[in-house]
Image: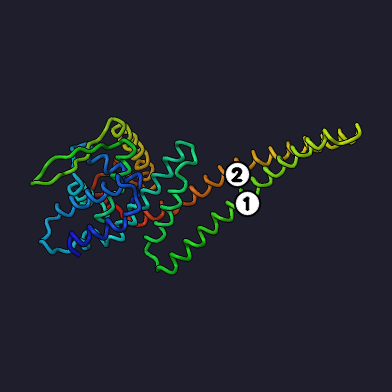
Amino acid sequence: MNKQAFMQELEYRLRHLTDEDKLDALEYYSEYIDDLNLPPEGDVCVHLGTPKEVARQIIAQTTERKIEEQQEKKTTKGFGSIVWLAILGIFASPIAIPLAFAAVVIFISFIITIGSIVFAFGVSGVACVLAGLLLIIVGFITPGFGQKFVVLGAGLFVTGLGIMFLLLTSVLAKLMVKMISGIIKKMAARHSRKKMQGGIE
Amino acid sequence: MTYQLTAPLLDACVLGVVEKEDVYGYTLTQRVMDVVDISESTLYPVLRRLQKSGLLETYDEPYQGRNRRYYRITPPGKQQLYFFRSEWLTYKEKIDSLLGITKMLPAGEINQ
């Protein structure tokens, strides 16, 4: 594969990275290949491996870095792009496409499952708060002193329960983002290390 | 090639080479490859990470009608390198003592 073909494929495989990350990598490899001083049709892959392998290392490292940046800032912003990078990473890994597809499906189902649990907590919270507020209103128009207090009390209790559910939801959501980021980071780290096995001669 | 190179050790090697003089991707790779068994595409992600964490910085210089990107060590990079050096020395001494290598032995005796 000559330089032009190599660079074209590399650019294609890095198309989902940010422009800054992509351009930096492309400039580095363009310069590196020039420095190899190959004949015009010389095979670049002998030196660098295939564009796929090169792209895999870059994507793995970018994913790892993005997660570290996110963890330092302690926000859940950019979580979507990390999940996206992880999916790209799976497709860029050296396994057969059907297997990669299966891995991506499992990964997405996993996120959906955990997301649904968090969502269920959130919905329960909102429902409790609404029901509680309704009970409080009903409490005021209920005839009879005793009944008023029972209904009002129940309303306050359910509202409180709902607020607790909502708090729990936000804690769970943060925990989920942290956990999934952690898993992706471990996967990315394993990928970027794989090519680096070597030693002192 | 018996022993494996870990990521922090590779970071340390790169910082060590760049501290001596500013280098561009190709010469850096050649210099590290002379000593350690890595592939030619190993160092780009390492350089990018070190650059993004502020341990290295880059500048461009024209060379034969194109650009050459040089890497230069930053003050935090030097700090990190000093840390890596002292860590390496401690580690090396401990392993030496486990392997029975002492500084007292003349070179010939170690080879036996």
Chain ID, mark 1: A
Question: Residue A158: percent from the left, percent from the top?
Answer: 76, 39
> With A18 as the anchor, is B18 left or right in this view?
left
Residue B58: quarter of image: top left
Q: Which residue is mark 1?
A: A117
Q: Nearer the viewer, residue B41 or A177?
A: A177
> With B27 as the anchor, is A167 left or right in this view?
right
Give SS at disc 1.
helix
The quadrant in which the C terminus of chain A is found is bottom left
Question: Any mark on residue A90, and which?
Answer: none
Q: Which residue is mark 2?
A: A172
Question: Residue B29: percent from the left, percent from the top?
Answer: 22, 49
Residue A7: quarter of image: bottom left
Q: Is residue A197 visible?
A: no
Chain ID, mark 2: A
Amino acid of disc 1 = Ile
At 50% from the left and 62% from the top, the residue drawn is: A105
Asked if labels 1 and 2 touch by Cβ distance under 8 angstroms, the answer is: yes
Residue B85: quarter of image: top left
- Counting residues from the N terminus, which is met first, the one under dot 2 or under dot 1? 1
* Marks 2 and 1 on same chain: yes
At 31% from the left and 61% from the top, the residue drawn is: A52
The quadrant in which the N terminus of chain A is found is bottom left
Q: Is residue B27 above or below residue A107?
A: above
Question: Residue A164: percent from the left, percent from the top?
Answer: 69, 38
At 30% from the left and 53% from the top, the residue drawn is: A199
